[in-house]
Image (tube, rainbow, N blue to C red):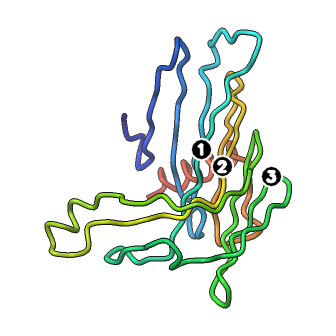
């Protein structure tokens, strides 16, 4: 793990392959990018590796807890996009670059919140899995997921990474 400016970067070694992961937000927008890139020097066998990522959401503030059934959004699939509609409140858009999104509607329970326990607050949480990203890793190419309150958020990860880097260097 390292920070490049304000961007967290992880490098994972998996079965002789190196995968880089980055997370960043679009400047001045409610949009988050999570991207992975297979090392360009990777000697990939006949089949390209696939990465599967569960897409977990909730509607709690940072000092509350979620529980199964507390959040029952409509989940719509549209090609490489998912729309999570919380009635009369907001829509959250998830988009894939370099793969597909498959819908789900299952709860992941009993997340341990140790710091909340120290503060005397509820120390268990649950998150709704609204889908799974199935991304095919190609050497040297960014693939990933975009989560946004903006329907028109860009899925072009390289361009979004460039905007963040330029913004970060100007700060």
Mark 2–mark 3 Cα distance, whole angstroms, equals 11 Å
- Residue behind mark 3: 80
Circle 2: element type:
strand
Packing grade of label 3 (10 A; few <14, some 14-19, many >=20) is some
**Seen from this angle, which residue lies furthest right?**
79
Q: Which residue is mark 2?
A: 132
CA distance for labels 1 and 3:
14 Å
Q: Position of residue 151 (x, y in %)?
A: 75, 70
Q: Is residue 117 above or below residue 146?
A: below
Sooner in the amino-acid sequence: mark 2 or mark 3: 3
Report the residue at 62% width, 46% height from top: 162
Figure check: 123 above or below 50: below
* Residue found 76% across the figure and 41% down from its top: 99
Tell me the crowding category of disc 1: few under 14, some 14 to 19, or many 20 or more residues within 10 angstroms, Cα based. some
Residue sitting at the far bottom: 88
The tag on residue 53 is: 1
Q: Residue 69 bears which disc, if any?
A: none
- Identified at 14% across, 66% down, the residue is 118
User: Residue 130 placed where, x, y %?
Assistant: 64, 61
Q: What SS does tag 3 mark?
A: loop
Q: At which x and y percent is residue 43? A: 66, 8
User: Which corner quadrant holds the N terminus?
Assistant: top left
Compared to residue 29, the image places residue 162 above or below, namely above
Q: Is residue 117 left or right of residue 43?
A: left
Please, what secondary structure does the residue beneath circle 1 have?
A: strand
Mark 2 and 1 residues: CB-CB less than 8 Å, in contact?
yes
Mark 1 or 3 closer to N-term?
1
Q: Residues within 10 Å of mark 2 (few under 14, many from 20)?
A: some
């Amino acid at each position: 793990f390292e920070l490049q400016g304000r961007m967290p970067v992880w490098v994972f070694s998996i079965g002789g392959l190196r995968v880089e992961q980055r997370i960043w937000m679009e400047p001045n927008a409610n949009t988050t990018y999570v991207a992975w890139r297979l090392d360009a020097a990777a000697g990939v066998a006949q089949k390209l590796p696939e990465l599967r990522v569960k897409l977990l959401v909730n509607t709690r503030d940072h000092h509350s807890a979620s529980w199964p059934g507390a959040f029952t959004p409509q989940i719509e699939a549209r090609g490489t996009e998912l729309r999570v509609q919380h009635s009369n409140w907001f829509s959250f858009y998830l988009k894939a670059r370099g793969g597909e999104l498959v819908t789900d509607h299952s709860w992941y329970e009993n997340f341990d919140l140790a710091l909340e326990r120290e503060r005397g607050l509820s120390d268990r949480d649950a998150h709704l899995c609204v889908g799974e990203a199935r991304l095919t890793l190609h050497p040297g190419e960014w693939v990933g997921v975009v989560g946004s309150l903006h329907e028109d958020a860009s899925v072009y990860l390289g361009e979004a990474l460039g905007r963040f880097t330029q913004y970060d260097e100007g700060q």
